[in-house]
Image (cartoon, rainbow, N blue to C red):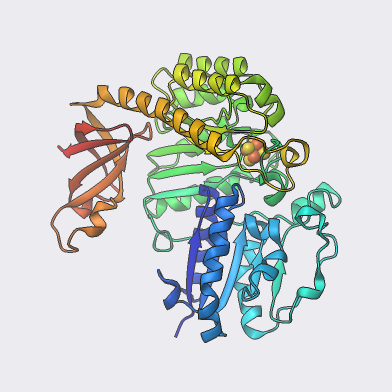
Amino acid sequence: MPHRVYIQTVGCQMNVLDSELAAADLMQVGYELVHSPREADTILYNTCSVRQHAEDKIYSALGRLKPLKQKRPDLIIGVMGCMAQKDRDAIFRRAPHVDLVVGPGQLGRLPEFIDRVRRGDNLSPLPTDFGPAPGGEPVARAVFQPSKLLEIGLDRASGRRKDISESFKTFNVNRTAAMRSVPHQALVRIAFGCDRFCAYCVVPRVRGPEQNRPAAEIEEEVRRLADGGCLEITLLGQTVNGYRDDSGGATVRLSDLLHRLHEIAGIRRLKFVTNHPNYMTDDLLAAMRDLPKVSPYLHVPAQSGANEILRRMKRGYTVEQYREMLERIREKIPQAAVASDFIVGFCGETEEEFQQTVELVRTARFKNSFIFKYSSRPGTKAAELYADDISEEVKRRRNNELLAVQNAICLEDNQPYLGRTVEILVEGPSKVARKQPPGAATVQLVGRTVHDRIVVFDGPRELIGKIIEVTIEKLDPFTLFGKLL
Ligand code: SF4
């Protein structure tokens, strides 16, 4: 009987991709992917450290697994991803029934690690240079029992950049369409890690130094995905528009890469996330304008509309520079949809500074904004330098106020779609479809326009993975409701 693995993923698209790659890697050595922890002999959590809430959820889920592990001691429980890198052996202390902790830079060896745990042959000499654990606590080797395995990258301050980078290996696996949850869409990593060290962000610590994948390797992966029937590629990088590859002699920028990928037969749509405002160069905007397969959609987080907050966040731009970037986008690609991220309640944010953020959202008319309440992360500059002094109540109120402004804009900007026919890539059944009878001739399906607008409509399942046209009959701030032509 093959081993059965269950993987639960929280966090960003980078984590979604890592889980897909980990699953593909395990399937290649005979594992079967199951959809419930109870059916599995290996349970893995791919974790996120960006907010405290995401970590709390994982620790609760791990706690709930304790009775199962007591009943089935051969069950293997693993924690991987950002929380593994950040909390390291502290995970074993909080959840002693966890067997392995694997950082994002070590995922490429996951099948070997699980195998070692299963055989009980799992204690590699523990690295000595991880540096202190969060909060300055030294790594306590004494807590390791022979059945535990810890594999993580080196601490950012622990030595030479080359060694640290090498300890965060980018992880890419050849995966067939059958190994991917959505065969017609794929995430492709082009860069790993980050060097920007925004004051609130834990990513540079948990994902290591910025490393760009060679363009030729990316091209080959996209070609293989296209051969397998993939229509839409989303390129991923923490600061994706800062991509540069010098491995082949001449420098390849993101714009050059888009030109190369645009030539690949079978690919119909190309997207890229997440962008940093400082790298929104004219050559990139020109590539978006000139290449019809590149979706006119940009996610460029602003984070705040107040210069003092941006300075303390160490974002590296002012509101005026962000607005200038928006103007350039709209001048070059007038129909572009721009989405943003905002953090409300950052350390010391005054009411006036928050209102400057509201003003930016009101005037910039983002397609949508992802709004988060500030969550202090140990090990970041913000946690070290500033007090997390905005109350939860004020954060919540600011979050709701900003959301209300953004939602009103979404509703207004969706209105012109009424009665219009739009082209969508059908992504799959909607949440409603899961409650519809399995044999139903038509179900509710979800698709997306090139501008990343979500369209829901009734149609046969055979349309999944096809690019079709629907006419919009109804809408709300977040969704367009269409009718099949
Ligand atoms: S650019 Fe800033 S926010 Fe984005 S991953 Fe890097 S440090 Fe974090």
Asked whether the viewer can see residue 244, the reply is: no
Question: What percent of the width, then of the height, locates residue 452?
Answer: 38, 35
Q: Quadrant of the C terminus?
A: top left
Decide which of 422, 321 is in the foreground and name it. 321
Residue 440 in the figure: left or right of residue 309 = left
Q: Is residue 128 left or right of residue 61?
A: right
Task: Identify the residue at horizontal 71%, vertical 28% (top origin).
Answer: 312
Residue 202's place in the image compared with 423, above or below, is below
174 vs 439, nearest the viewer: 439
The residue located at (73%, 41%) in the rendering is 383
Q: Could you tell me which residue is drawn at 77 percent across and 36 percent down?
A: 385
Q: Position of residue 133 (x, y in %)?
A: 78, 58
Drawn side of residue 140 relative to residue 101, left or right:
right
Q: Is residue 31 above or below residue 207?
A: below
The residue closer to the viewer here, 19 or 373, is 373
**Ligand 1 is located in which of the four quadrants?**
top right
Q: Is residue 222 above or below residue 354?
A: below
Residue 242, image x and y in percent? Answer: 63, 33
**Is 439 displayed left or right of 174 in the figure?**
left
Q: Quadrant of the N terminus?
A: bottom left
Q: Please state the horizontal and vertical placement of residue 241, each as a whole percent of the image.
A: 59, 33
